[in-house]
């Protein structure tokens, strides 16, 4: 499990991104459960994720409407299958509007760059 914390801070909201090998939707549930064993991540406002399995794409917005699809589109462009990417947000008290999608994209970009080495 690769975790990059405090990668983006905007108007009090903080973002992290994590991910790792994951083959099925059940594996994704186990991955999220493991991530939330860290109290910091269990207290996050949103743990949004995307995964492309052999059966097709799977995502969860976790209250951050549309964010899972942003992650999926980026994974599809990279042709990255069997690997979950989770973008975590701790809400800072101010609405970010459309900026939240740019932050999700940037978080995934940073994760993919780190993954490539």
Image (spheres, grey):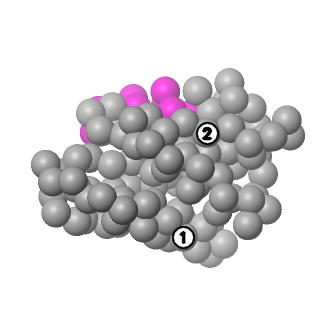
Q: Nearer the viewer, residue 117 or 94?
A: 94
Q: Nearer the viewer, residue 36 or 71?
A: 71
Q: Is residue 45 visible?
A: yes
Pair 1/2: label in front: 2
Locate residue 94, reporting x and y percent. 15, 54
Image height of 27 relative to 92, above or below = above
Q: Which residue is mark 2?
A: 59
- Label 2 Cα crowd, 10 Å radius (few <14 / some 14-19 / many 20+): many
- Label 1 Cα crowd, 10 Å radius (few <14 / some 14-19 / many 20+): some
**Region of the chain picked out in magenta, as a range:** 31-40
Image height of 33 relative to 50, above or below = above
Q: CA distance from mark 1 to mark 2?
A: 17 Å
- Count the labels in the image: 2
Residue at the image position 39 percent from the left and 29 percent from the top: 37
Q: Secondary structure at mark 1?
A: helix
Secondary structure mostly seen in the magenta stretch: helix
């Amino acid at each position: 499990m690769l975790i990059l914390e405090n990668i983006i801070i905007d108007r009090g909201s903080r973002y992290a991104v994590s991910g790792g090998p994951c083959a099925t939707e059940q594996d994704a549930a186990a991955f999220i459960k493991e991530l939330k064993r860290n109290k910091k991540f269990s207290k996050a406002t949103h743990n949004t994720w995307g995964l492309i399995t052999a059966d097709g794409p799977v995502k969860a917005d976790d209250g951050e409407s549309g964010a899972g699809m942003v992650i999926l589109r980026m994974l599809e462009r990279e042709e990255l299958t069997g690997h979950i990417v989770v973008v975590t947000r701790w809400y800072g008290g101010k609405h970010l509007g459309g900026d939240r999608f740019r932050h999700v994209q940037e978080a995934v970009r940073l994760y993919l760059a780190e993954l490539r080495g």
